[in-house]
Amino acid sequence: MLRTLGKTGIEITPIGLGCMQFAGTANVTRWMVRPIGQDTATSVVRAALDGGVNWFDTAEMYGNGHSERMLATALKSCGITPGEVTVATKWAPLGRTAASITRTIGDRLRHLGGFPVDLHQIHMPTGSLSSIPAQLKAMAGLLKAGRIRSVGVSNFSARQLELAHRVLAAEGITLASNQVRINLVHRNVERDGVLDTARRLGVTLIAYSPLEGGLLTGRFHDDPALARSAPVMRRFFGRRELSAQGLARTRPLIDELRAIGQAYGVTISQVAINWVINRYGDTVVAIPGASKPRQAAEAAAAMDFRLTESEIGRLNELSLT
Ligand SMILES: NC(=O)c1ccc[n+]([C@@H]2O[C@H](COP(=O)([O-])OP(=O)(O)OC[C@H]3O[C@@H](n4cnc5c(N)ncnc54)[C@H](OP(=O)(O)O)[C@@H]3O)[C@@H](O)[C@H]2O)c1
């Protein structure tokens, strides 16, 4: 069931754990997720590991190193040693030149406390003071120096993906991945060329927000008042989907997810995640986030069954494209 990360030879489970939930309060991420303590983070990581998850996605931007430190501490508490799992992190480009990729790798490694950077990603294509080629060349330099194991990007368009691939190929390196939002209510990759380009280049797509920040668990449909207590940026970015009309629009989809889930004895969220990892063959892997161990256990167990083509087709029809 393992999948290869791009053409790197790194073997990952179809589901990894997204660690934005470990960002703490140090920066803007505090408006995206509710802070949790180290003990809870450790329980979340343990639940993911127990469920068979073998890789973890964090980022500099998730609390300026807080998430990386929490992840490393959690892995150690669970008896995991460096090399036993795959760790992905990201460089934050905002207001910085490509030189900061090289300058900050020491911080990444220090925060990860001995765990290697198996995948280093450019968090977004915008905001840097340097060109995309300059950023990729800096990443190539880190790889050649043995400081990271592979190079990925995030939120890149089809054209930017081509460019990144070309720049790295000239350095003799393959682009491993592009991390983008993919879920049942966000299927843009199917139209904007990102999926086709990734397939052609052999690049893995890492699906972030596979539950659309909790919408695809059905919890807001069950209790619309819950939306009012969601973190402020979730409320802002999700305002259309969390509105009464938005929830009414997705209710048939949630009902179908529930019905399919009942047949398998699984939850709405497990069916939603299973759709992400099976609709696109091996090209797409997913990194659901979890702030509670139960959520991480549920997400991991979404690897234990497989939707049929006709179930995937029914969900395609009901989901917004
Ligand atoms: N590259 C990028 O630009 C980018 C952007 C966003 C995210 N990411 C990555 O993707 C990961 C996941 O994205 P995400 O956190 O935005 O969205 P998500 O995975 O769609 O949603 C995660 C949230 O859904 C809720 N949830 C999860 N399982 C649940 C369950 N079984 N029952 C009820 N609620 C459940 C939890 O909310 P509560 O915590 O409120 O309970 C959890 O924090 C992040 O951790 C991060 O690593 C990357």
Image (cartoon, rainbow, N blue to C red):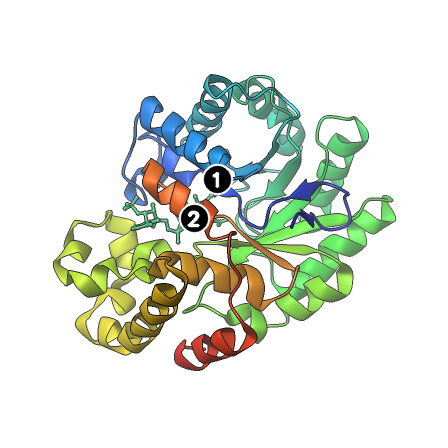
Q: Position of residue 216 (x, y in %)?
A: 34, 61
164 versus 91 height, above or below:
below
**Does ligand 1 reach within 8 Å of label 1's beta carbon?**
no
Tell me where residue 193 sits by quadrant. Answer: bottom right
> Residue, x 56% and y 68% (percent of image)?
279
Q: Position of residue 159 (x, y in %)?
A: 68, 65
The three-letter code of the residue at mark 2 reads Ala
**Does ligand 1 reach within 8 Å of label 2's beta carbon?**
yes
Instruction: Tell which of 251 and 274 is nearer to you.
Output: 274
Per the image, the residue denoted by label 2 is: 299
> Residue, x 64% and y 33% (percent of image)?
101
Tell me where residue 260 sits by quadrant. Answer: bottom left
- The C terminus: image quadrant: bottom left
Per the image, the residue denoted by label 1 is: 51
Tell me the distance, in whole angstroms, between the alpha carbons under discs 1 and 2.
8 Å
Q: Is residue 141 visible?
A: yes
> Residue, x 86% and y 49% (percent of image)?
170
Kindly check if marks 1 and 2 are in contact, taking CB atoms under 8 A apart as contact: yes
Q: Name the mark on residue 172.
A: none
